[in-house]
Amino acid sequence: MAHSTASTDTHGHPADPSKRDMLELLAGASAALLGAGIAWPLVSSMNPAKDVLALSSVEVDLAPIAAGQGIVVSWQGKPIFVRHRTPEEVKAAQDAKPGELNDPQTDAARTKPGHEAWMVLVGICTHLGCIPLGNKATDVRGEWGGWFCPCHGSQYDTSGRIRKGPAPTNLAVPPYAFESDSKIKIG
Amino acid sequence: MAGLHKSEFANPVINWVESRLPIFTMMQKEYGVFPTPKNFNYFWNFGALAMVTLVLMIVTGIFLAMNYQPNTELAFDSVQHIMRDVNYGWLIRYVHQNGASMFFMVTYIHIFRGRYYGSYKAPRELLWMLGVIILLLMMATAFMGYVLPWGQMSYWGATVITNLFSAFPVVGPKIVTLLWGGFSVDNPTLNRFFALHYLMPFVLVGVVFLHVAALHITGSNNPLGIDVKSPQDTVPFHPFYTIKDSVGMCVFLMIWAGFVCFAPNLLGDANNFIPANPLQTPADIVPEWYFLPYYGILRSVPNKLLGVCMMFASILLLLALPWLDTSKVRSARFRPIFRILLLVWCLTFVGLGICGAHKPEGVWVILSRLFAFYYFAHLLVVLPILGKLERPLPLPESISNPVVRGAMGKVAAVLLIAGGLFGMQGVTPAHAEEEIVLPQQKWSFSGLFGTVDIASAQRGFQVYSEVCANCHAMKYLHYRDLAGLKLEPEQIKAIAAAVTVPQGTNDEGEPKEGPATPASQFRSPFINDKQARSRNNGALPPDLSLMINAREDGANHVYAILTGYADAPSTMKMQDGMNYNKYFPGHQIAMPQPLRDGQVTYADGTPTSLDQEARDVVTFLAWAANPEQTERKQLGVRVILYLGFMACVTYALKRKIWAAVH
């Protein structure tokens, strides 16, 4: 803009500079807005498409999962742990004191009332995205009997709360609801 | 001359960069103060417009490539995925699709400008030749891009164009096999065309850079075609031509947006809405409008090899144009005979295009030969001789002292080109068979501002579900898409849940079925095409998702078929199992009359006449084929108003900036 004024001045531009400045401002601003208007749909096209958004819920039948066992289902491309906890595991989770926890949260806040035996978690270690072990009874489950991440040794308790290792927060609980006593809908 | 560049910018950061890489000085020299003849007319916009188009094509193309699948099984579906599911996917694709046409329009006008004002003559020969190479690269890129959607025209266009090379003796068939990567156009062909279609625009950028670099050595030509003699003849490029190009750009983008938002498929072919079928060629095979003149030349020659050679020669010959034209005078303004003959040549080019759009029969063959003859005669005979014989008008002293005023020839030229382009588009390919005239109905969705009548489309969905869906799939629609017909999520859930669809496999690995969800595709009545054929007397009921786009004048066509059943005239011998229909090509259709009075019962109490049912189902299908149409037209109004406002502002600013020069 500065150059433009300079070069026209050398041509002895006569007329009313304020009107021209105004027009330059208006043209520049509208060009910038046009550029933004072109960029917006392009950037927006990189967000999830309608078909991806439409597949954002999945139903899980709980009946076949024995106490002490867990399964992994896929939701939005992520592994979801669904674990049927034994009464001892539930008790251990509920008895944990806030002072012992790195990311304090009660077990009740992480389960649905009346369905405390069921733990539903996003199975992605909050450290760097690996999938922790521990769904099978034969897996390494760490000192707290929950999950153990093989990548950098983070240990989660039976409520999926971080107890030891580099992970900063508890395993996330996805949005889900009980459709019946033996069926949940995630998402 | 090693050592740091001496920089005199005040800003220390710019200074630091500048002393190591003097790009700011270069930009200032080449685009800031660059001395440019002051007498350009608006024809000199088109180089900049082509540049803008190239950039927009590359940008939209990159975003399309993020969602496109270059695989014969997936390509057509992935384009529909872009059109229906990707955010603004329809907008990006239509900009890109119509952008190809815009690119050629702009480039053809740019070439005409060069021809008319003699911009190809010394010292700008190399600049011109680089331009011809750009045109060739553009053609290759456009051709390969047209193959990617993998519709019928994509497939058969690819087959025909690659087969051109088979005309060459001995090596021809080997070249074709090499291009295909197989023994017909197939997946390897599509893969490599995608790779090359992505690559070529960047090669194009490179050649465009050389084209512009050469321009900045010789300087621009101008409408008078005389050399710049003094600084009084020039103005700095910025702001004089940056602003003038901006005015042109706003108008150009308005036209482009007009196509995208109001007539996105006007320049396309209905057949390309039908997925590629290697076993059946469409009845009329016509290239895109910008290739028609060359196609006309190809078909004007009865010999295969000669035809192909002539077609390639028609472009390659342009490389020699600077030497074929022996006149020293550049601008056609001062060459009265050349000027007329050049316009005649342009007419033959347009004429060849019109011939290319018609079946090569009767008068079209004779005309195309006449036009092709003049096309070459003009370049090879007329130009060399005319340059020697013609007596040019006296040239003006200098650009700042033009004794001779420019005539209105340019106006005629613009009209000629515009008329030609539209003329070429206006021609519908002539059919050999008897012409079926479709009765024209009034539709809620037609016209520039028409919107889909939602109530009618909802009733049409009912007709589709209760009647059509027994035989016809609509695989590009999902139950969730019904939100576009203003159905509530609960209604959509209920509609979906009432339908049983395949749902992968159960725990034992057997295929299983279950109630559909909003995310499910519309249920297909048959497992596959084979089953569909065997249950329908050998005929395949086509998918209806894109039916309205896949036929010329689709809405009227489908309506006419649905209401066109009658008793066969006694003179007609009907095949077994076929039904007479007034509007079906050949009048024998496998589908029995699907709709009759009272076929369905409408909840809203609308009377169920055949006419009403047909109207409703066509409205539904028109929505289904282009679910974005209402949003698209609304966006079009806003975009065009905005660009119109911008055109006014830039024009006012241009007037102010140029006030001192005029």
Image (cartoon, coloured by chain):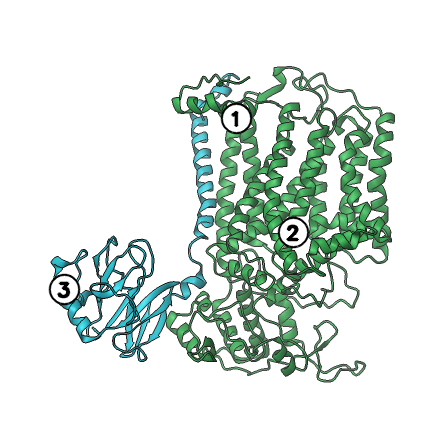
Chain colours: A cyan, B green
Q: Is residue B158 above or below residue B218?
A: below
Answer whether residue B304 is visible to the viewer in this image: yes
Q: In the visual, does B106 lie left or right of A166?
A: right
Q: In the visual, does B105 lie left or right of A175?
A: right
Task: Kindly identify which chain the residue marked by label 1 belongs to.
Answer: B
Q: Is residue A166 above or below residue B410?
A: below
Q: Nearer the viewer, mark 3 or mark 2?
A: 3
Q: Nearer the viewer, residue B660 or B127?
A: B127
At horizontal 50% and vertical 73% (from top left) the residue drawn is B522
Q: Which residue is mark 3?
A: A96
At horizontal 25% and vertical 54% (from top left) the residue drawn is A167
Query: Where does the image place residue A115, in percent across and percent down from the top left?
Result: 22, 74
Q: Which residue is mark 1?
A: B27
CB under 8 Å between discs 3 and 2: no
Q: Nearer the viewer, mark 2 or mark 1?
A: 2
Query: Where does the image place residue B305, in percent across and percent down from the top left?
Result: 84, 51
